[in-house]
Image (spheres, rainbow, N blue to C red):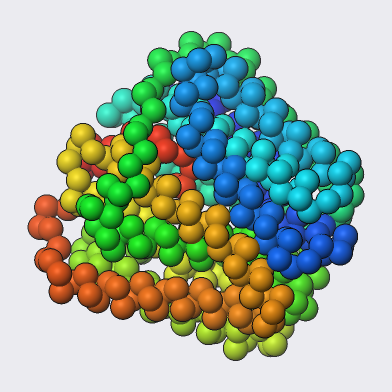
Amino acid sequence: MRLLISFAALFLSVVLLQLGTGGVAPLDALSGVELGFSTAEVGTLGSAHFFGFFIGCWWAPRLMGTVGHSRAFAAFTAAGTIGLIAHMMIVDPIAWALLRMASGACVAGCYTIIEAWLQAKVTNETRGRAMGIYRIVDVGGSLAAQLVIGVLSPATYFSYNLLAIICCAALLPLTVSRAPQPDTPAAPRLRPAMAWAKSPLAAAGVIVSGVSTAAFRMVGPIYGIEVGLSADMIALFLAAFVLGGAVAQFPVGWLADKFDRRTVLMWLSVTAALACGTTVALSGLGTAAIFLTAGFFGITTMPIYSVSTAHAHDFATDEERVELSAALMFLYALGAIASPLVASSLIAWFGPASMFVFIATIHLGLLVFGALRMRARPTPSDRTRYVYTPRTSFLIGRLLKRNGED
């Protein structure tokens, strides 16, 4: 209980940040449809979000070093609030893409600062429990953010203003906290080639994870509308995906620690392709079937990032882990930036099923690449422990400290 109280301000900021910014993607998709945006324009908004996310990841450690944690957090939160509240003032897809870049930078910047603060407060004795609570709070906030969409009307001032108010409220717990600000951590060098050098399969895995999860979360509402879901049902559709991914972390983590992680990754790719086919095949059988397939898709795709990062860290030294985590997050962002635009364009040209054909093809490619890599070298005998890895900031590697948890 003392641990929870000591981190209460940080965790409350995480919940409010998720509620405020986590719902903007589906709300933008539904609002874009309401306002007559093309499917490709809606996809561009998702790509813009992840472009802003990458900028925030890169800039946040440098801004913290210049103005301190609290002021940097206030600056990023202000950017996110402006990105939300200005939506209905400028109804234009290009303007909205710029606003979504601000929201994406807000998410990445705020998480970087929160995780830097956590890193300074935890000890080796409290790290496991603190990270466990942090993951629960993060996933719970993400799940709640999807459900909030069910009660918000698309393309209205009220909906965007409410999200902006919640985002702005995330300022309060952290900025009024009496806890002293920690020292600013050094920004990790960004060396994307490092991930490929350590494990080409892990590098490919995080890119595929970015492609599949970003396409679903950013363009999934368009798919849902195309197959007959109402706006309030879109919230449950996305929540099923998040819930499935969260539940899958435990059994997949056990498998990844017990068996060759490359084999686990390949089976996840097989089941992800199967989930894509099942989603398309059962889309005409009613809302219950659509929700079940969304959950199945989350189960098979969301753990791929954590399995890939665990496999990459098996080949890294303790000194390389932070930079390796940053390199893997960069590759994830590359896949996430490209996929919403590609997926939305495919839906516009070939219909809703084409998005899942695209995702299935990517996963089958990962399966083939994994089979080739298994013939290239054996798996290491001394492996790190599997850790559910949030895709939040470049500093997450410092918090996880894989060898310290073994």
Residue plotted at (76% across, 72% down) = 225
Camera sees residue 45: yes
Question: What quarter of the picture does the C terminus occupy?
Answer: top left
Residue plotted at (60% across, 88% down) = 281
Q: Say above or below: 167 vs 338.
A: above
Q: Say above or below: 168 vs 190.
A: above
How many marks the image carries: the answer is 0
Horizontal and vertical percent position of residue 309: 32, 53
Between 222 and 114, the one nearer to me in the picture: 222
Horizontal and vertical percent position of residue 80: 69, 35
Residue 345, quarter of the rendered image: bottom right
Horizontal and vertical percent position of residue 160: 81, 44
Residue plotted at (81% across, 38% down) = 85
Horizontal and vertical percent position of residue 45: 69, 54
Between 197 and 292, the one nearer to me in the picture: 197
Q: Is residue 277 left or right of residue 201?
A: right
Camera sees residue 5: no
Q: Is residue 366 left or right of residue 359?
A: left
Residue plotted at (59% across, 24% down) = 73
Residue 168, quarter of the rendered image: top right
Q: Is residue 359 left or right of residue 104?
A: left
Q: Say above or below: 354 vs 345.
A: below
Between 151 and 182, the one nearer to me in the picture: 182
Between 77 and 236, the one nearer to me in the picture: 77
